[in-house]
Amino acid sequence: DDVLDVVTEQIALEKKSAFFARFQALLETNRTKEAKDLLNKFRGRLTQEESLRAHTFWSVAIGKKNPFADFLTGAKSLNSAESLLDVARLAMLANRLDIAIQAFDNAWDIDCNSFGLDQANQYLQISLSLRNTNQAHEITKSLLDRFPYKFGNANNHCYLSLLLGEDP
């Protein structure tokens, strides 16, 4: 409710960052009609990725069947690594690791450099838990190249390289 007090509808209609804050707060407080109205008023100013994300939040809030699968399908059609990473994040929060791994895999294939450190480490943990050693090794190599000052990542890469019989 605090967000709704601070971010009025007028402010939300003026600034995209404020739009998402108010939209999500409305959904979280079960004010779905107001959220839908706000979305309709703001619709033309959202990118395709943002529109897809907003509609997914809406679908989750109203209990639509398979919103995560729909989000994944939509993100794949956009061929957007960022959108696929949004899918992975939301799917993990909902404990839908089946969707999360598909989203991570697709995002990685599009642009492995779009992964931030946290996202890459999440993908690494899922790959390791699925015993996908080759994928985990590829992730640690990317992390080592992009974040050489993170010694834990270097250690992970060294360990996986040795496990695969490669020179670290």
Image (cartoon, rainbow, N blue to C red):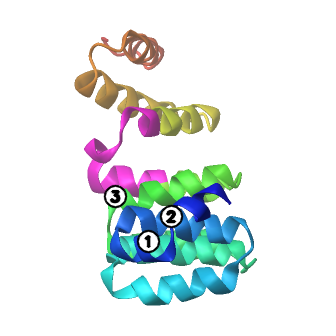
Q: Residue at x 29, y 57 (%)?
A: 110
Q: Which residue is mark 1?
A: 12
Residue 60 in the image: state x and y as whole percent: 68, 72
Compute the Cα span from label 3 to label 2. 30 Å
Q: Amino acid under label 3?
A: Ala
Quarter of the picture holding the C terminus: top left
Q: Secondary structure at mark 2?
A: loop
Q: Amino acid under label 2?
A: Val
Q: Quadrant of residue 115?
A: top left
Circle 3: is it few (<14), some (14-19), or many (20+) Cα within 10 Å? Answer: many
Q: Can the viewer see residue 58 in this picture?
A: yes
- Of residues 83 and 129, the one drawn nearer to the viewer in this rendering: 83
Quarter of the picture holding the N terminus: bottom right
Front position among marks 3 and 2: 2
Q: Amino acid under label 1?
A: Ala
Circle 2: is it few (<14), some (14-19), or many (20+) Cα within 10 Å? Answer: some
Q: Is residue 42 above or below residue 97?
A: below
Residue 23 located left or right of residue 109: right
